[in-house]
Image (cartoon, rainbow, N blue to C red):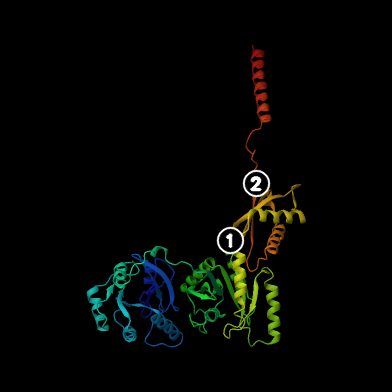
Amino acid sequence: MKPVIALIGRPNVGKSTLFNQITKSRDALVADFAGLTRDRKYGDAVFQNKSFIVVDTGGIGENEGGIDSYMAEQSKTAINEADIIIFVVDARAGLLASDEHVARELRTLGKKVYLVANKVDGVHAEAALVEFFKLGMGEPMQVAASHGRGVSQMLEDVLIDIPEDGDADEHDKATGLRLAIIGRPNVGKSTLVNRLLGEDRVVAFDEPGTTRDSIYIPFERDGRKYTLIDTAGVRRKGKVDEMIEKFSIVKTLQAIKDAHVIVVVLDAREGVVEQDLHLIGYALEAGRAMVIAINKWDNMSDYDRKQCKLDIDRRFDFIPWAKVHLISALHGTGVGEMYPSIHRAFDSSHLKVSPAKITQILNDATEAHQPPMISGRRIKMRYAHMGGQNPPTIVVHGNKVDKTPADYRRYLENVFRKVYKLEGTPVRIEFKTSENPFEGRKTVMDERIAARKRRYVQKFKKAEKKFKR
């Protein structure tokens, strides 16, 4: 199995920047802001033909209360999972009490720990690092993660006992079905993720904005592989003040595009609000398959439940194909029933059909209900084929098909959806008008007419000259 390397340290020492350098990605959010990373984040990395897993963690502080205690628990879980620990300290800030607190925790584990001093750029290294010898972990390795300096040398030392794997460049990229959990802040997304996983994998805290990054979590259920993506809550633009939260929204939108299936989580007690519809709009624009989860359904009165159902029927009439589940993520009610809908949505979004079958369905549909007339001539749809998956895209060719009105497009979409029993996914239909093969080419008759005109012109010019004489 691949070795696991955990990045541990107090908040704001540059663990996420180092994570991005090691994984050669921008997967972890980075800003000059303490406590930005709150959950543990996994990434695949390869260095000198050695593949491994690196884990970014939230900071461990000396005083852990409120949400900080949850962040510390995530970091401690990562420590237990890790084979190697990189203890990151800040060379500019110097040795702090919280660094000594982390060092005491690590010394009791009996694991291989490497002390790494980050942010050595712009400081006198020898003077700045001398006080870190008090931690009893030997000489600190020097890196400047923001510039990538010293990272390669650090990895050489850390991975010295790790054997090469001959297929490191082709390390396992199979992530299975990618499932993104999206919704407004504090609707229970992280609680649902933990319920789906069966463990407290991400921080779930009764405070809006707890999740700030998109957390990718691979897991397996009944022999099937998944990657669960917990995302930051997205609020209205007018309420997004913090730069960090704006970054989080970008990561959420990236997660939507990266996912196969989206689970949109709503709060049953608040009903369907405009921001829920905006989020669904983002998912539709990306063409992603979708399942709706109405959370916090427990402990509601019969009247409130009835009103919530009426609201759902009224506000979601534009996505009748999306399955709605009434759940309680906290107690697990209805959560397991979501998996069949997720699988049907995934299978529908990855539809594969031969051009002959698609064309036959198109012909049957146009015979049952002919396309409309445009400028006195009827639209002619000749053949169709699959143009892509996730979402399933059907390309229709013919004459004047680019003039097809929206209602006939919806008719065709419903025909294809009914024939192939497509559930949980949008269907896109693209029209391409066939070009006239003779357009721009002169016919034989055109050539004869042009030659006759030239002869008449020549005769006229001769007659004109004769007349002048």
Q: Quadrant of residue 108?
A: bottom left
The residue at which mark 1 appears reads as: 389
Q: Amino acid at mark 1?
A: Gln
- Label 1 sits on a secondary structure element that is loop
Q: Are marks 2 and 1 in contact (CB under 8 Å)?
A: no
Residue closest to the eye, 439 or 453? 439
Of marks 2 and 1, the one in the foreground: 1
Question: Residue shown at 39%/68% (left/top)?
Answer: 45
Question: Residue shown at 30%/75% (left/top)?
Answer: 116
Left or right: 306 as drawn, with respect to 251? right
The residue at which mark 2 appears reads as: 434
Q: Position of residue 465 (x, y in %)?
A: 64, 15
Left or right: 292 as drawn, with respect to 170? right
Query: With respect to residue 293, does 372 lie above or below?
Result: above
Query: With respect to residue 386, does 203 lie above or below?
Result: below
Q: Of marks 2 and 1, which one's residue comes earlier in the chain? A: 1
Density class for disc 1 (Cα within 10 Å; few <14, some 14-19, many ≥20) is some
Q: Position of residue 415 (x, y in %)?
A: 71, 61
Q: Quadrant of residue 443?
A: top right
Residue closest to the eye, 163 or 442? 163
